[in-house]
Amino acid sequence: AQSVTQLGSHVSVSEGALVLLRCNYSSSVPPYLFWYVQYPNQGLQLLLKYTSAATLVKGINGFEAEFKKSETSFHLTKPSAHMSDAAEYFCAVSRSNNFNKFYFGSGTKLNVKP
Amino acid sequence: GAGVSQSPSNKVTEKGKDVELRCDPISGHTALYWYRQSLGQGLEFLIYFQGNSAPDKSGLPSDRFSAERTGGSVSTLTIQRTQQEDSAVYLCASSRPTGEYTGELFFGEGSRLTVL
């Protein structure tokens, strides 16, 4: 079975500070892992994905995530937060041999303080 | 169209009424998904369509929920005899054909359903 756990439903950082959003997964087969972002009143959009190539994945807007198999983690980071990063972030997993089911975490709302 | 289009964007209905939510996927996308996003919860998978294959309905929460996809394009999610616990944002997403698959879902902006 696949599942995703996001620690912290709300994270608040100051502008310019490091952003760290945590995601742990469980998967019975090698996973594909994703981070999606949802800005207010918008649909979700893909931020970055891991599909068994490089373990450090770079996405849009300066975000990156590292796949750590030993820790079953795929944490999202950004060195310096910007006000425009305020949004809700969702981690998701799908099976590498079955794309039709994506399992999403409960989301983390990122607040960026001036 | 340029993106996934959902309608209505907002729907307020009375308990017991039926509602229909529509999704128009990106042209050429063969896969279509419905998810439900409730306050403080993640995205709950409802149903998946892939081309002409039988849909995966394993996420539908009760027999009051049904969905169809006509002509491999537009999809309608129907909720019969709505209950207050059905209040949520219903999200539709589509993705490219399997041979071109990139692992990316393209989401619409959602239909917010409020059941009074």
Image (spheres, rainbow, N blue to C red):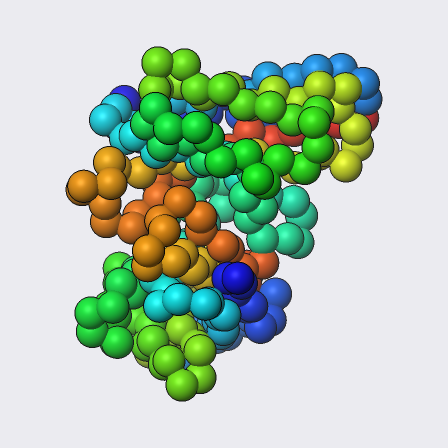
Query: In x, y percent, where is residue A9?
Result: 61, 65
The residue at 41%/36% (across/down) is: B93
The residue at 25%/24% (across/down) is: B27
Q: Is residue A111 visible?
A: no
- Left or right: residue A62 compared with residue B113: left
The residue at 53%/62% (across/down) is: A1
- Left or right: residue A85 compared with residue B37: left
Query: In x, y percent, where is residue B111?
Result: 55, 29
Q: Hey, which residue is sitting farthest bottom in the picture?
A: A70
What is the quadrant of residue B81 in the picture?
Answer: top right
Question: Relative to B3, does residue A74 appear above or below in the rendering?
Answer: below
The residue at 44%/48% (across/down) is: A101
How many numbered discs? Answer: 0
Q: Nearer the viewer, residue B50 or A16?
A: B50
- Left or right: residue A40 compared with residue B24: right
Q: Nearer the viewer, residue A76 or B100?
A: B100
Q: Is residue B67 visible?
A: yes
Query: In x, y percent, where is residue A92?
Result: 44, 58
